[in-house]
Amino acid sequence: MLKATEAILAELISFPTVSSDSNLDMMAWMADRLEHHGARVELFADSSGAKANMFATIGPDVPGGVVLSGHSDVVPVTDQVWHSNPFQLSERDDRLHGRGACDMKGFIAAAIAMADPLAETPLKRPVHLCFTHDEEVGCMGARALVPELQKRGYAPRMAIVGEPTEMRIIEGHKGCCEYTCRFHGMEGHGSAPERGVNAVEYAVRYVTRLMALAEQLKTRVPANSRFDPPWTTVNVGRLYGGVAHNVIPGFAEVDWEMRPMQEADAGFVKEALHAYVETELLPAMRKVNPAARIETQVIGEVAGLEPLPENAARDLVAQLTGNETCDVVPFGTEAGLFQEMGMSVVVCGPGSIHEAHKPDEYVSRDQLSQCLTMLEGVARSVAA
Ligand SMILES: [Zn+2]
């Protein structure tokens, strides 16, 4: 199995599926291979036609079963110094190097390798392989795919998201929501502030409200939160506006993000900000300039994975890996989207997040075999 997985991994790494580029060649290669082994494969193109998600099924067409999930895209190699071609698998000391080796083509290769024996085993529940595009830039692919799967009536019971965790079991992570807020006021001479609408001042009032909300979030921590820090955080990442001392700035822009540890916190912040904008900021701006406006652009809203007391996926993976401790992590994945679909979800995959996104990224043979052992167990769990 390990040999087969390595051969597949070499193929996958050879497709330079950087998020900004097409993943269609890699998808076509995987679809071909999976169909050849009896999987039912469906590809979902995005609106540009340059990228696709894949959902493949092995076994009976019934509810339940397990989703093995991975993203096909990788981060760029720009400005990184590699000791070998990043898009060609190279082996050194039992480590397999290449862009995406651990994040997360190693897991995808293991899942595809498992498809061969799976197709030859009578199954009572299906195994689905779910490979997405654009995870690294805000889980765009998965967000488009989830409603499509719901439309088709898929109702898998659990999902294993194979992000690199060194095969440790991750049952929770915070979400990540990013926004850009633009303030359009009215320019004027600095000597007559009341005749203009100072976009920078309104941006600062917005940020001040946001920071007050950030303080309130610290009082909304459930007793058992295992996150570090244990509350939902807010970060103002960029503040822009103005041209000179004596000019009333007509435009300002704020980039900010929030890492919700529970869905309700995201709603709390968004509703409070919306109310503040509608009842305080906008009326004041429009008194001077009726055309003044505030636009909020959603850059990305990735759901968190909420750790739940009952989690069949976690229990299965714990039993298969013999790993009894479960953790939460600070990085985001597609897992929260699957949880919203009603599945029990766990994140567990080969390789280390510390190697991901770096030059000379690798996955070790040992990690790949541990992953295969887990997947063989998954196969047994759905066998007739
Ligand atoms: Zn990843």
Image (tube, rainbow, N blue to C red):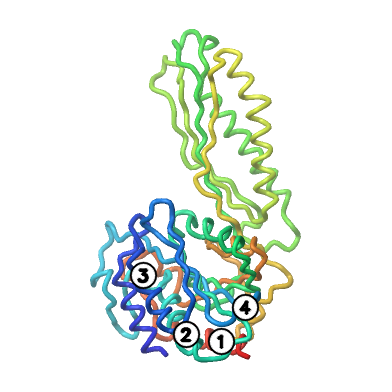
**Relative to 79, 323 lies left or right:** right
Mark 3 vs 2, N-terminal side: 3
Identified by mark 1, the residue type is Ala
Is 201 rendered above or below residue 302?
Answer: above
- Asked which secondary structure carries label 3, the reply is helix
Identified by mark 3, the residue type is Ala
- Residue 148 x %, y %: 56, 60
Mark 1 or 3, closer to the camera: 3
Q: Residues within 10 Å of mark 3 (few under 14, many from 20)?
A: some
Q: CA distance from mark 1 to mark 4?
A: 10 Å
Tell whether label 2 touches label 1 (CB within 8 Å): yes
Identify the mark at residue 114; answer none if there is no mark: 2
Identified by mark 2, the residue type is Met
* Residue linked to disc 4: 65
- Residue 216 x %, y %: 70, 43
- Asked which secondary structure carries label 1, the reply is helix
* Residue linked to disc 3: 28
Q: Residues within 10 Å of mark 1 (few under 14, many from 20)?
A: many
* Quadrant where the C terminus is found in the figure: bottom right
- Queried on whether the Cβ of the residue with tag 1 lies below 8 angstroms from ligand 1, the answer reads no
Q: CA distance from mark 2 to mark 4?
A: 15 Å
Mark 3 or 2, closer to the camera: 3
- Residue 57 x %, y %: 52, 76
Mark 3 vs 4, N-terminal side: 3
Q: CA distance from mark 1 to mark 2?
A: 8 Å
Mark 1 vs 2, N-terminal side: 2
Tell whether label 2 touches label 3 (CB within 8 Å): no
| Total marks placed | 4
* Residue linked to disc 1: 379
Q: CA distance from mark 1 to mark 3?
A: 25 Å
Q: CA distance from mark 3 to mark 2?
A: 18 Å
Q: Residues within 10 Å of mark 4 (few under 14, many from 20)?
A: many
